[in-house]
Image: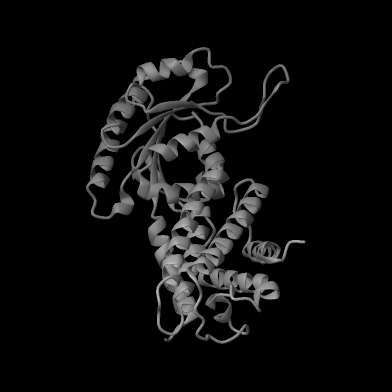
Amino acid sequence: MDFNLADEVRRQLEEALSKRGRVNIVIAGRSGVGKSTLVNAVFQGNLAETGQGRPVTQSAREYSKEGLPITILDTRGLEMDQYLETTRQLEEEVRERSTDPDAKRHLHVAWVCISEDSRRVEQGESAVAQMLARYMPVLGVITKARSDQGFREEVLRLLPMARNAMRVRALREQDDEGHVLEPRGLQELVDVTMEVVPEAQRNAFAAAQKVSVAQKRTRAHAIVGSAATLAGAIGATPIPFSDALVIVPVQISMLASISAVFGLPLNQAFLTTLISSASGGLMATLSGQTIVSGLLKLVPGVGTVVGAAISAATAVAVTTLFGEGFISVLSKLFLRNQGEPPTEEEVAQAFREELHGRSSPRP
């Protein structure tokens, strides 16, 4: 049985990125409502500042950034004298995308942003929310939240088509009396958005946002569970030559998919380094035991591929060890970096140390 690690890594990377997909969000609101600040507070990479923007209509721009599985359609012009034309142009764009054969262009959720300072819902905000709700779930986002005084309930009353209304403050502020107001509501906004985004786009949304590491972990745990189940089924089935070797692609796919859902920059060199780190982390304590999988023997310099049948229980144990160890490492690193991705070197080193600690005999 021929096996080429580079080819397998390349194939699994492409598959992981394809499965992750892309999420596209409409963010509508008047000028000065704080849309760009909100985007930068929620998503990786200061998207509103560093992403590539291109005009879509006279009052809307599309923002994206290489490596991030998200596109933001930012709509302006909801002021009183412009909202009818803005809404008309936007609906043409939304309708065209909803029927586009390329599913990556479809729009999945809309945030209609209203400043709490205004204390009112303008006609333009109501009109655009009503129009967007015909095509996708709509959430009201009350920005610059400082003092509710019943405004959220008023927003829900005036925007009955909205699934919810979330009060958010994207930046740390200080009021006139010197009181510090910390950011608020971003976690709740991410959680509610995750509930209304289609299932096929949830991994992409989890990857792009930087507010909730818990959402990334939840999606990643499901990936580990599926991979462990598949590995166990392979281990339980008599396979000529080496079932360990057959399980290796499952483990590579799992590591690639977890990387994708956490929003790590994905490339072949990184994933190959990650596999080498996994090998180094387990070799010291597991090399003489049956739990060593074919993965350890595929890394150049570690060894050669040999026939090595492994049990279903061992297949599940090794796969789960890899997957949960990787999730633990990424969770710690992303929390330390306030949701932004760590470097490839940091990930590889921490993964090696994590696996060594998990596989070492306990006193």
Q: Position of residue 249 (x, y in %)?
A: 45, 72
Q: Position of residue 351 (x, y in %)?
A: 64, 63
State the residue lying farthest toward the right. Answer: 363
State the residue lying farthest toward the top. Answer: 149
Q: Position of residue 179 (x, y in %)?
A: 71, 21
Residue in the image at 53% along x and 16% along y: 148
Foreground of the two, 266 or 230: 230
Foreground of the two, 30 or 150: 150
Horizontal side, residue 234 vs residue 83: left or right: right
Looking at the image, is 211 positioned above or below residue 252? above
Looking at the image, is 244 positioned above or below residue 36? below
Horizontal side, residue 353 vs residue 158: left or right: right
Looking at the image, is 214 positioned above or below residue 128? below
Foreground of the two, 266 or 333: 333
- Dividing the picture into quarters, in which one does residue 277 lie? bottom right
Looking at the image, is 242 positioned above or below residue 144? below
Foreground of the two, 96 or 355: 355
Quadrant that contains the C terminus: bottom right
Horizontal side, residue 269 vs residue 126: left or right: right
Quadrant that contains the N terminus: bottom left
Residue in the image at 33% along x and 21% along y: 160
Q: Position of residue 20 (x, y in %)?
A: 41, 56
Residue in the image at 33% along x and 44% along y: 107
Specify whether residue 142 is in view.
Answer: no
Specify whether residue 224 is in view.
Answer: yes
